[in-house]
Image (cartoon, rainbow, N blue to C red):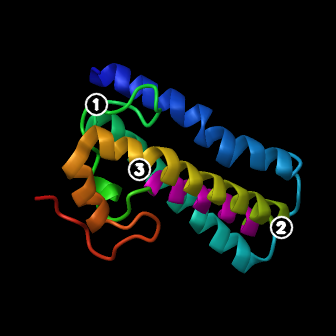
């Protein structure tokens, strides 16, 4: 896949999937973000989680297009295994980022429905990763993915970046 088409595909997937999961659905659950903000401490913590999640999410999508020459979408996978940037710390930075954004919104609006929704998203994503994504990556990238999977945790980031050999 050429880089321009990988960039366009990644941008479309970003809008369609994380945009809906971390943006549109929480917007509906909070009545269009029409609820009052929570306490100043929760607003600060929520804002930090949202901002950090957005930064990691955008960075991770860029890695797919630029490093992997593909998209995160299963229908247009990367030509190379993406292991740089945030992927040196955690195997699933996009999923972690999306959950950070949803939890940040839950804190921002003190909204338990978003906490429950984040739990549903977490279980769904974990199941998808275990049943589809990891076996698919193992078949596609073989020993390279297995070495990466052994070295980099799936959900809780490493403190130091992994260096591929």
The answer to the question of whether label 1 and label 3 lie on touching residues, with beta carbons closer than 8 A, is no
Q: Closer to the camera, 138 or 126?
A: 138
Q: Residue, x 44% and y 56% (percent of image)?
A: 93
Circle 1 residues within 10 Å: few <14, some 14–19, many ≥20: many
- What residue is shown with label 3? 134
Q: Which residues are magenta?
A: 93-107
Secondary structure beneath label 3:
helix
* Residue 63 visible: no
Residue 69: image tag: 1
| Distance Cα–Cα, label 1 vs label 3 | 19 Å
Q: Closer to the camera, 56 or 117?
A: 117
Please identify the quarter of the rendering in which residue 39 is found. Answer: bottom right
Q: Where does the N terminus fall, quadrant-wise?
A: top left
Q: Closer to the camera, 163 or 149?
A: 149
Q: Residue, x 70% and y 79% (percent of image)?
A: 41
Q: Taking 95 as reference, is 152 left or right?
A: left
Secondary structure beneath label 1:
loop
The answer to the question of whether label 2 and label 1 lie on touching residues, with beta carbons closer than 8 A, is no
Circle 2 residues within 10 Å: few <14, some 14–19, many ≥20: few
**Residue 85: in magenta span:** no
Q: Main secondary structure of the magenta part?
A: helix
- What residue is shown with label 2? 112
Q: Residue, x 26% and y 67% (percent of image)?
A: 151
Q: Earlier in the sequence, mark 2 or mark 3?
A: 2
Q: Residue, x 20% and y 50% (percent of image)?
A: 144
Q: Closer to the camera, 75 or 10?
A: 75
Q: Is residue 146 above or below residue 17?
A: below
């Amino acid at each position: 896949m050429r880089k321009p088409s990988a960039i366009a595909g990644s941008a479309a997937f970003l809008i369609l999937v994380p945009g809906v999961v971390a943006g549109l659905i929480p917007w509906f659950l909070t009545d269009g973000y029409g609820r009052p903000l929570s306490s100043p401490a929760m607003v600060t913590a929520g804002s930090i989680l949202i901002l950090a999640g957005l930064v990691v999410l955008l960075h991770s999508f860029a890695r797919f297009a630029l490093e992997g020459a593909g998209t995160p979408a299963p229908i247009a996978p990367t030509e190379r295994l993406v292991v740089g940037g945030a992927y040196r710390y955690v195997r699933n930075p996009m999923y972690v980022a999306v959950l950070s954004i949803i939890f940040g919104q839950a804190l921002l609006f003190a909204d338990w429905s978003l906490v429950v929704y984040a739990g549903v998203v977490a279980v769904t994503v974990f199941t998808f990763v275990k049943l589809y994504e990891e076996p698919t990556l193992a078949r596609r990238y073989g020993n390279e993915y297995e070495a990466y999977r052994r070295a980099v945790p799936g959900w809780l980031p490493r403190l130091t970046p992994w260096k591929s050999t």
